[in-house]
Amino acid sequence: MTERTQRRLAAIVLADVVGYSRLMGVDETGTLAALRAHRSELIDPLIAEHGGRIVKTMGDGLLLEFPSVVGAVKCALEIQHGMVERNTGIADIDALRFRIGVHLGDVIVEGDDIFGDGVNVASRIEALADPDGIAISDDAHRQVRDRLDVAWQDRGEHRVKNIARVISVWHWTSGEKQASAIATAASEPPAEPEEASIAVLPFNNMSGDQEQEYFVDGITEDIITELSKIPGLLVISRNSTFTYKGKATKAQDICRDLGVRYVMEGSVRKAGERVRITAQLIDGRSGGHLWAERYDRELADIFAVQDDVTEKIVRALEVNLVEGAQNRPARVETENPAAYDCVLRGREQYRLFSKDANLNARRLYEKAIELDPNYAAAHAGLAMTCLHDWFAGSSGTLDQAYKLTMKANALDPTLPLVYEALGNVYLFRNQYEEAVSAIGQWIEIEPGNADAYANLAGNLQFAGQSERVKPLIEKAMRLNPFYPFYYILYVGQADLAMGRYEEALESLQRSAAHNPEALPTHLYLAACYGHLDQDAPARKALAEVYRIYPDFSTAWVKTYFPYQRAADSDRLIDGLRKAGLSE
């Protein structure tokens, strides 16, 4: 060993965030901000207080060293108690929850880092901990069992990867979690997910060409859309299933996370002028394959292939899951594969939600219309890019969006995107009944689409029907468990409109944690704090509004927050004035 290398006995602690990859996939900025806040306000001070040190951070994980096992376990207990309190009022799907493992063992010390068998064992023990819980080795348990008033559960012996000997592990969870677990165990088994429920995972791109991701994702999304048209079939939203993209996850785990019975997965391979698509249906209880099929076609016939794949999967699911679902509207699509390709590329660009990407999407949709002037999806997609431009301050594009949407509607009145665009266009043209009716038609065509219910909720709160918002958002959240920030925002907006400021504040704070860069969330937070006479947080929220959009004004609010009732608009602006907004 060198002069800087030594051995010593230490209490080693490893902690990481449960489901970190999923949380980052849903909201990278919000997750990182929340993790930084938890560390600076709770975790790091507790580590110092109990005499520990942070050896290193590993993305979502921490490697800690303590001179005392008692100190290490006390610190772990206080962290977990603190996290339970900090997660109060936050949906489980949004909360940052930790697993913690503690071991007493020999370590090799080099500079500020530690290595060796003790660290390896601690890592394996941490992986055995429950969410919100602590797992400790038998060696650590002997040091704390008579020194801490803690009920440890003996979880027996485990054989773990790369450790030759068997490891005995003891577990702890918070009193609230333990009581819940005991009550669950003593009661009837938890309800099974609905039989007619499915999640379609992103198909794998087997082409060896990253440029084909848009094509593979487009096939997946079109399958989800077609399934969402089947009444009685619960279909998890694209936003939620795509958080598993590129991740190796068991079907049973996905079904448990999303609350569904079945998973659909598949792959696409394009080679030369041919394409191969595989798809299989998996039972979330057993993990067994219930149905699988492979399709080989010419690339020139790619749209017919995609349509055929979708229809065969739909029929198979109708037989296996929701037998008797009939009368779905017939699809009206282009026969030009190049136009379809442009629409898929445009869809990919539009969802980047940037000025340059929106321009790229616009050009692609225009090219699709040039290739097929009667392609409704291209006209509807182009209308959405015009709406994006209008939100960015481009005059005249709202009228352009209206004309394009009406054209798309005339070409294909069964296309869901037509009604999404119509609902938004009508809303900002102050045609409230027409806006609500358009979204209602979207739900009739695609009753399994989460965003349709969320859009209806958003339109209704602007139309003065705030009391209808929360049930619709709860429906949307069931279909899209990894929901975006604006779902919770709509609930906060509705509560504020009804004068329920405390309830509104809770939802708006959650929305801000989801997406700290969203202007509307800070705007409504400022108004809410203003009505509650909380001057300091009101000014802070308003400062965030000006940081994101320096030209913010009451005129901007009246343009882009189209309330039908003057009282609702006045309530919002009055709250902003109390927060410090000047004309």
Image: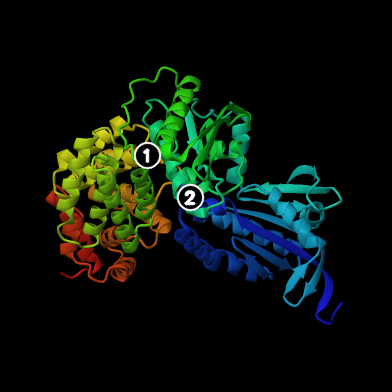
Is label 1 or label 2 in front?
2
Residue lying at 81% horizontally and 53% vertically, measured from the top left: 162
**Amino acid under label 2?**
Gln
Give the vertical position of 495 relative to 416 (above or below): below
- Crowding at mark 1 (Cα within 10 Å: few <14, some 14-19, many 20+): many
| Number of residue marks | 2
Res. 102 image quadrant: bottom right
Residue 89: tell me if it is visible.
no
> Residue 115, percent across and down?
78, 67
Q: Disc 1 on helix, strand or loop? A: helix
Q: Identify which residue is drawn at 28% across, 70% down.
A: 546
Up the image or down, 91 lies above or below 304; here it is: below
The N terminus - image quarter? bottom right
Marked residue nearer the N-terminal end (1 or 2)? 2
Q: Disc 1 versus disc 2: distance between alpha carbons?
A: 27 Å
Disc on res. 212: 2
Query: What colour scheme was applied to this rendering of the protein?
Result: rainbow
Tell me the residue that label 1 is attached to: 450
The image quarter in which residue 405 lies: top left
Identify which residue, 582 or 4, lies in the foreground.
Answer: 4
Count neighbours of disc 2 (C-alpha within 10 A) and say few if under 14, some if 14 to 19, many if 20 or more.
some
Above or below for 383 versus 308: below
Displayed quadrant of residue 303 = top left
From this viewpoint, is residue 383 visible? Answer: yes
Residue sitting nearer the eye, 66 or 419: 419
The amino acid pointed to by label 1 is Ala
Q: Quadrant of the C terminus?
A: bottom left
Name the mark on residue 531.
none
Q: Give the residue at x 35% y 60%.
A: 357
Q: Nearer the viewer, residue 468 or 506?
A: 468
Residue 36 picture location, percent across and down: 52, 65
Q: Position of residue 306 (x, y in %)?
A: 43, 35
